[in-house]
């Protein structure tokens, strides 16, 4: 859809926005809908008409001119919408200005349709994760199978794109919050290198948080990254021979246990991965077997990583609540008290949030933990990439490789690889070295174009 908008004879923005609004009202909030949206921008149609007027006098800002997009409910917008992290406790005065990345996208000509639902507080509320649930938005569902895993925490953004409500939605990943919902909902999920896209004005959880995108094709992800970073460099490598000569590492799949060998989902995922390797090779990629990323990483390292992450969450949340004007709660203690007053049947506990609030870790200890742990995770990825002179590494999504890429701050992209016997998507995860986005997007594009594996949910009617 974004590519069509760049043509002078393409559909008008107001027409696209009306279609999106109809789909949200009739499908997203209907019996077969995913409940992706938490709030609609009341000014969306007016903003679209203004962009159509620009187009009428020959001003086209670029490929995103007039394109309707959605934002996870952590991006501040200086308009009439809330920015609440999915929490009813944070519903108050709207933010005073836009996040910097939102300003960049508006400059490129997008129309913000609304905010998307998410796992409340980026999944840092309950000991038992309820992906896609928030006190403000309720439960978001997977449109491929309503009782399937929707994944989190950027759940609503993935579902909005999967349902065809918008061609582009923004999310934020701490660890898996873009890659996982993209994989489970059958769309492209792109997580750039930590720090590449500004997080100013974004309600983040830790230093490893990064702004990323959900789209239905790789080109739209590259165009969005151009707009978010105010550059023009990420679409250059998207060509027909993108895979030719690329050195791509992979980890050979281990033997399955007897129980796993009978699991149809695991069997489908492994078969699609094997098929993907053959396809990559057929398109000119040079496949290089590499070892397991987890080799040499002890349980103590993972425990220290979790502790450092939770310490960051406490520092980030406390600072955000204290510094954001107009919020009814100003600290973690007040947030927890609000949730206790508004508890009810079916509402997840807040054991994790309470534990985070009670952490007694000094800034010095927290920084020391990160200084010790960061290089270990980075080395786990950098070593095979460097030793084998790799352009990227590919794995099946169920391998959990996104965990290590996130902990290292490296970029990754989830690309659909097919469907399992239960009608749920399967996916590949491509990842690479820090700031390797041009190459990573090129490799993902090559596979996407060769496989054409993306599938719409079974029930997605037109906007009429």
Image: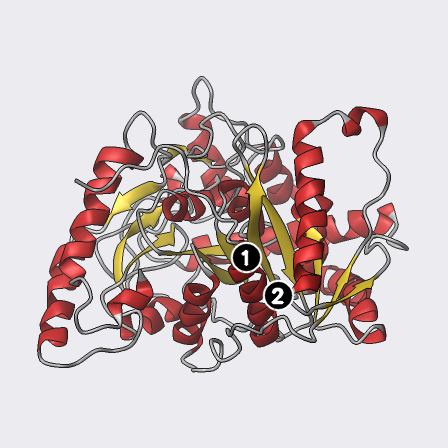
Farthest right residue in view: 296
The residue lying furthest to the top in this view is: 345
Reading the image, the residue beneath label 1 is 316
* Viewer-side residue, 67 vs 37: 67
Q: Is residue 333 above or below residue 58?
A: above
Tell me the crowding category of disc 1: few under 14, some 14 to 19, or many 20 or more residues within 10 angstroms, Cα based: some
Which quadrant: the C terminus? top left
In percent of width and height, residue 317 lies at: 52, 52
- Which label is found at residue 411? 2
Label 2 Cα crowd, 10 Å radius (few <14 / some 14-19 / many 20+): many
Can you give x and y, in whole percent of width and height, for residue 412 in the image? 61, 61
Residue 267 screen position, x and y as percent:
71, 34
Please report the residue visible at 34 percent of the width from the left and 32 percent of the height from the top: 33
Lower sequence index among marks 2 and 1: 1
Say which element carries label 2.
loop
Task: Give the quadrant of the N terminus.
Answer: bottom left
- Total labels: the figure holds 2
Which dot, 2 or 1, sits closer to the camera? 2
Left or right, 330 with reference to 153: left
Q: Is there any visible trace of residue 205 in the rendered image?
A: no
The reply to whether callout 2 and callout 1 are in contact (CB within 8 Å) is: no
Q: Position of residue 48 (x, y in %)?
A: 16, 62
Q: Secondary structure at mark 1?
A: helix
Question: Mark 2 to mark 1: distance in Å?
Answer: 22 Å
**Left or right: where 193 falls relative to 86:** right
């Amino acid at each position: 859809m974004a590519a069509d908008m760049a043509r002078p004879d393409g559909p008008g923005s107001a027409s696209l926005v009306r279609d999106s609004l109809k789909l949200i009202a009739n499908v997203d909030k209907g019996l077969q809908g995913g409940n992706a949206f938490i709030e609609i921008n009341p000014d969306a149609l007016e903003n679209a008409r203004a962009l159509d007027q620009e187009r009428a006098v020959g001003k086209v800002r670029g490929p995103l001119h007039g394109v309707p997009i959605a934002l996870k409910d952590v991006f501040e917008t200086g308009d009439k919408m809330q920015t609440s992290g999915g929490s009813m406790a944070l519903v108050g005065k709207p933010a005073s200005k836009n996040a910097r990345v939102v300003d960049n996208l508006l400059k490129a000509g997008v129309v913000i349709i609304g905010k998307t639902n998410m796992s409340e507080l980026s999944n840092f509320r309950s000991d038992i994760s309820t992906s896609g649930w928030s006190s403000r938005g309720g439960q978001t569902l997977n449109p491929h199978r309503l009782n399937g895993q929707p994944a989190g925490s950027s759940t609503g953004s993935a579902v909005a794109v999967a349902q065809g409500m918008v061609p582009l939605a923004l999310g934020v990943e701490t660890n898996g919050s873009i890659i996982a919902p993209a994989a489970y909902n059958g769309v492209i999920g792109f997580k750039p290198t930590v720090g590449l896209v500004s997080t100013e004005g974004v309600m983040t959880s830790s230093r490893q948080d990064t702004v990323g995108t959900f789209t239905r094709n790789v080109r739209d992800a590259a165009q969005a990254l151009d707009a978010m970073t105010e550059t023009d460099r990420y679409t250059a490598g998207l060509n027909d021979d993108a895979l030719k000569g690329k050195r791509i590492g992979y980890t050979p799949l281990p033997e399955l246990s007897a129980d796993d060998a009978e699991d149809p989902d695991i069997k489908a995922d492994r078969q699609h991965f094997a098929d993907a390797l053959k396809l990559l090779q057929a398109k000119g990629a040079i496949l290089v077997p590499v070892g397991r990323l987890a080799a040499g990483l002890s349980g103590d390292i993972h425990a220290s990583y979790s502790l450092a992450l939770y310490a960051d969450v406490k520092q980030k949340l406390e600072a955000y609540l204290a510094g954001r004007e107009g919020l009814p709660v100003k600290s973690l203690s007040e947030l927890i008290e609000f949730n206790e007053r508004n508890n009810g049947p079916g509402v997840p506990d807040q054991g994790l949030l309470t534990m985070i609030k009670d952490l007694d870790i000094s800034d010095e200890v927290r920084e020391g933990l990160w200084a010790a742990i960061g290089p270990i995770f980075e080395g786990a990825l950098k070593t095979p990439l460097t030793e084998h002179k790799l352009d990227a590494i590919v794995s099946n999504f169920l391998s959990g490789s996104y965990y290590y890429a996130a902990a290292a701050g490296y970029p990754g992209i989830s690309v659909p690889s097919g469907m399992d016997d239960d009608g749920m998507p399967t996916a590949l995860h491509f990842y690479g070295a820090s700031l390797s986005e041009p190459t990573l997007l090129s490799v993902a594009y090559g596979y996407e174009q060769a496989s054409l594996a993306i599938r719409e949910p079974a029930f997605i009617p037109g906007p009429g």
